[in-house]
Amino acid sequence: MRLMDNDAIYAARETDLYIEKKIGLNQLATLLVDSLHVTKDKEELKWAARLLGWRKFKVGHYTLEGASTYDALLSRLAKGGQDPISLTIVPGQSRDEIVKALSKQLWFDSLAIQKLLADSLFLAEQNITQTDLIGHILPNTYNVYWTATPKEVMKRIFQQFRKSVIKPYGERFKELDKSVNEILALASIVEWESAQVDEKPKISGLYWNRLQRGMHLQSDPTVSFALKEQRRLYFSDYEVENPYNTYIHKGLPPGPINNPSLSSIKAALFPADHDYIFMVAKADGSGYHAFTKTYAQHQQKAAEWRAYLDSVESQGSK
């Protein structure tokens, strides 16, 4: 009988089937035959499903790969035997960007996740505040069910943060006499400053030097965060009154300005030991920075960077 043939359903490569609402035979047949092309005969598929007693199929994400019988696949879809998806959260994102990414990859919409992240009771249960929330959304790839609720997903993410940050580095926070929020704030600046993992401890060391000397951090990323836009900064931007503007306010900003990667968090916890207190992007487009110990040296490197930017912008306008 065809319904027991191992190749009744066949996916030549891994294929994702998403059922967004409970559906019947006709809708399923359209998905499998017309959209995914994992079987050819709609009528035979519907005949097999009726004979086997499977007529309604549950919401979920199902992975199809290789050969399968009608019974094996249809029973799985009818019972809701989902396969997890790989939920990816990238580093250096704003809260809005994270909300958009979560709602795009999962079943719930952005309003559902926004409502949860505004729930002070839920955050209190996780020992998190609105100020440090974004820093706890650890960049990673998580295996979760597509139909998981916002609460299930966020609890999974926060659990991973505790496992990857709090548990292994709890004593280091105490040694530095810094709160989790303070380290996350510094780590988020490091994250914004550079994508070069090998440079992050050096950048962290520079900011630690400024903190220890009582200097303003003068971090451009905090100004961009205050302005709520990423662009080339002008002198007037550095005068914007905002608690996150570290050109005006001394010390660390009130909280993280993005979700830093584990490498940035580790850099904030274990800064490189040096005497640099100034840095500016290298005038070569490499993404690395030129570090200096004196303001005069810094001015020279900054002039080189501005000239490089003007050159790039000039070429782009042609």
Image (cartoon, rainbow, N blue to C red):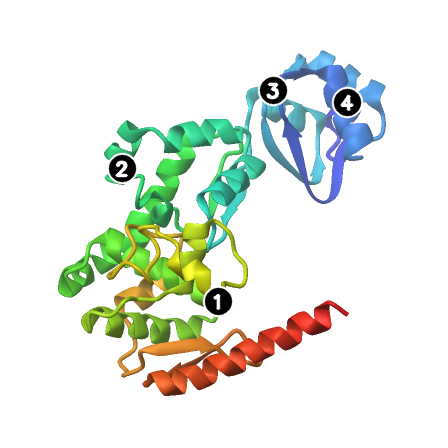
Q: Are marks 1 and 3 in contact (CB under 8 Å)?
A: no
Kind of residue at badge 3: Ala
Q: Residues within 10 Å of mark 2 (few under 14, many from 20)?
A: some
In whole angstroms, how far apart are the C-alphas of marks 2 and 4?
44 Å
Q: Which residue is mark 4?
A: 29
Q: Which residue is mark 3?
A: 78
Q: Position of residue 166 (x, y in %)?
A: 25, 53
Question: Residue, x 58% and y 37% (percent of image)?
Answer: 104
Q: Amino acid at mark 4?
A: Ala
Q: Label 1 amino acid?
A: Ala
Question: Which structural element holds mark 2?
Answer: loop
Q: Which residue is mark 2?
A: 126
Residue at disc 3, secondary structure: helix
Where residue 112 appears, as percent x and y from the top left, is 47, 27
Residue indicated by mark 1: 195
**Residue at point 39%, 82% (across, down):** 291
Q: Alpha-carbon distance for marks 2 and 3?
A: 35 Å
Earlier in the chain: of badge 2 and badge 3, it is: 3
Q: Earlier in the sequence, mark 2 or mark 4?
A: 4
Residue 68: x percent and y percent? 70, 34
Give the mark toward the camera: 2 or 4: 2
